[in-house]
Image (cartoon, rainbow, N blue to C red):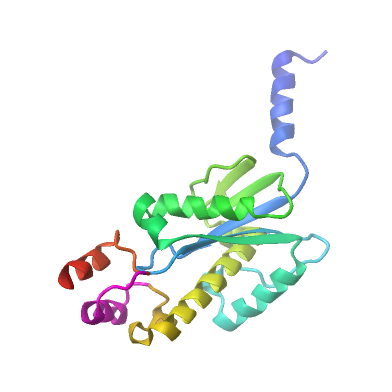
Amino acid sequence: MRSKRFLRAEQATLVWDAPGLVAGVDEAGRGPLAGPVVAAAVILDELNPIKGLADSKQLSAARRAALYDEIRAKALCCSVAEASVQEIDTLNILQATMLAMRRAVQGLRLKPTKVLVDGNRLPPLDVLAEAIVQGDAKVQAISAASILAKVTRDRMLEALHAQHPQYGFDRHKGYGTAQHLAALREHGPLPVHRRSFAPVAEAVREHA
């Protein structure tokens, strides 16, 4: 007869390795001075593989766009969510990122058995989860999530560029490039700028 200690250990292992659907989660937009932070959750279909999945930052824009469409077509389910600029300024960027990730997981049509998250922190979830450093380069489901998140956010910033072309959002996507900082100094911040970020706060003071 197995000891109670052995049974507890075996049960813990079985829970950790329980079969079922695995979701990959990643975000885009923690560092920019403007726009929301976007997160995606993806459950891939093992019977319908997608070739060429990789960290979104290592792919060309054209390749990301093609994979975005393929992921949308072939994944068992996927979900994209965001935390707004107001939530970023209220909560801080880390907590807003966790919020966007949690919203993405909650938005999945199918409930995963386990969630794999890129990075070293986990959002509060009601399912088993594991953080994987550089997961977007190691786990295909996380790679897929990174692509969905980045393409979605880039398209948001391109739409913003159409409204405010003087800021150059189509090129820097909200990051603090020299061009963006110069536009902030010249034109002042927009409502989509994150006022909790130092360069934006400085621009607010200059244009007060």
Considering depth in this image, is 165 or 65 the residue closer to the camera? 165
Instruction: Give percent across and percent down for residue 62.
Output: 59, 83
Residue 15 vs residue 79, the one in the foreground: 79
**Residue 110 vertical placement versus 30 (above, below):** above
Spot occupied by residue 19 in the image (x, y as percentages of width and height) = 78, 43
Q: Residue at x 78, y 60 (%)?
A: 45
Residue 192 as seen in the image, left or right of residue 2: left
Q: Nearer the viewer, residue 117 or 88?
A: 88
Q: Position of residue 201 (x, y in %)?
A: 23, 64
- The N terminus appears in which quarter of the rendering? top right
- Which residue is rendered at x = 81% and y = 66% of the image? 48
Residue at point 25%, 76% (across, down):
188
- Residue 111, position as x, y percentages in the image: 72, 48
Q: 118 above or below 173?
A: above
Figure quadrant of residue 68 = bottom right
Q: Nearer the viewer, residue 61 or 125?
A: 125
Say which quadrant the C terminus sits in: bottom left
At x 61%, y 62%, the residue is 145
Location of residue 140 by image quarter: bottom right
Q: Is residue 49 visible?
A: yes
Inspect the magenta stretch and tell me whether residue 107 lies in it.
no
Q: Is residue 196 left or right of residue 163?
A: left
124, above or below 46, in the image: above
The answer to whether any part of residue 119 appears in the image is no
Is-magenta flag for residue 181? yes
Magenta residue span = 175-191
